[in-house]
Image: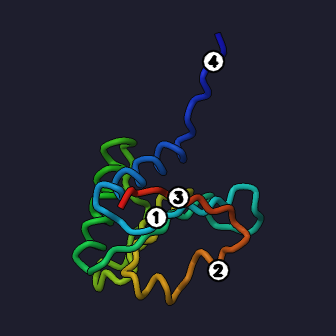
Amino acid sequence: MPRRKKKEPRDLLAGAVITAMINTKARNPVILDFTGMKGTVCDTFIVCHGSSRTQVEAIADHVIEEVKKQTGQNPWHKEGFENAEWILIDYSDVVIHVFQEERRRFYNIEQLWADAPVTKIDTQD
């Protein structure tokens, strides 16, 4: 019987992030995969947006909580909670961006990193 491949810590962390985003009704979550690309500061961006400051804060808080619960990891760095227009949560290899919709359109991270493979997450809404 073939052995199952063990999940990488990065994949476990990304799974916890996506679970938290889905649970808080995050809009249009996507994963940008930088593995194999030169000159990137991390392996993965996970990007989503919320419809209000309150929802953006709830998404970010739940991401931190769910990642801690599932992996035991705390963020290496976090910022943007002051105005909650763009909250960044940095786990070193995986960086999460939670935007308010207008800010997401303005910064357009997905287009900025257009060379990276993108996985859209189906949230069933």
CA separation in Å, label 1 and label 3? 14 Å
Q: Is residue 10 above or below residue 119?
A: above
On residue 29, the disc is 1
Closer to the chain start, of discs 2 and 4, is: 4
Q: Is residue 82 left or right of residue 110?
A: left
Q: Quadrant of the rendered structure where residue 54 is?
A: bottom left
Q: Amino acid at mark 3?
A: Val
Q: Amino acid at mark 1?
A: Pro
Instruction: Say which residue label 4 marks.
Output: 3
Q: Amino acid at mark 2?
A: Leu
Q: Quadrant of the C terminus?
A: bottom left
Q: Position of residue 2 (x, y in %)?
A: 66, 15
User: Which of label 4 and label 3 is nearer to you?
Assistant: 4
Q: Secondary structure at mark 1?
A: strand
Q: Amino acid at mark 4?
A: Arg
CA separation in Å, label 3 and label 2? 17 Å
Q: Position of residue 84 (x, y in %)?
A: 31, 80
CA separation in Å, label 2 and label 4? 39 Å
Closer to the chain start, of discs 1 and 3, is: 1
Q: Is residue 52 above or below residue 125?
A: below
Residue at image location 59% in from the left, 58% down from the top: 119
